[in-house]
Image (cartoon, rainbow, N blue to C red):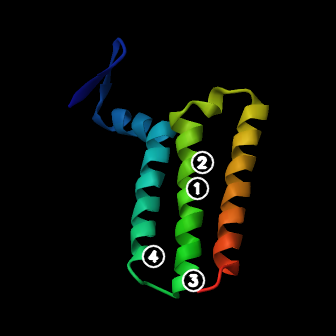
Amino acid sequence: MSTHVGSTVVKGSAARISVVRNPTVVSWLALMGATVLSWYLGEGHGAREAATVGVIVVAFFKVYLVGRYFMELREAPQILHLLFAGWAVVVCVVLVAMYLTAGD
């Protein structure tokens, strides 16, 4: 089996290796894994409070991956990348703190 990549023909296993090395594909796979983890935590596995905090943290990890790999922040100036990462961390921490300090 051969695959056309650009103007060259790549044999089966070489095409699969290049796909795995693609950061966008790897981040997409991480997003799928994080989605499964969120679902697992949301289905009542573990302590309710810890599961909720876990889902919030996983959600912001997903926000970071989408921003970095699908909104092209990896090619943006370093300061923009740092601002985005800082924003994601701060908002995540604030939401977790609000959740933990709120009364039932």
Contact, mark 4 vs mark 3 (Cβ under 8 Å): no
Instruction: Name the residue that disc number 1 marks.
Output: 61
> Residue 8 occupies which quadrant of the picture?
top left
Badge 2 crowding class, 10 Å Cα cut-off, few under 14, some 14 to 19, many 20 or more, is many
Contact, mark 1 vs mark 2 (Cβ under 8 Å): yes
Q: Residue at x 63, y 74 (%)?
A: 99
Q: Which disc, if any, is residue 19?
A: none
The residue nearer to you, when weighing 14 against 49, is 49
Q: Position of residue 23 (x, y in %)?
A: 52, 39
Label 3, label 1: how many angstroms apart (C-alpha)? 19 Å
**Rendered view: 2 above or below 24:** above
Indicate the secondary structure of the residue bearing disc 4.
Answer: helix
Label 1, label 2: how many angstroms apart (C-alpha)? 5 Å
Amino acid marked by disc 3: Glu
Instruction: Name the residue that disc number 2 marks.
Output: 64
Instruction: Name the residue that disc number 3 marks.
Output: 49
Contact, mark 3 vs mark 1 (Cβ under 8 Å): no
The mark that comes first in sequence, 3 or 1, is 3
Label 2, label 4: how many angstroms apart (C-alpha)? 20 Å
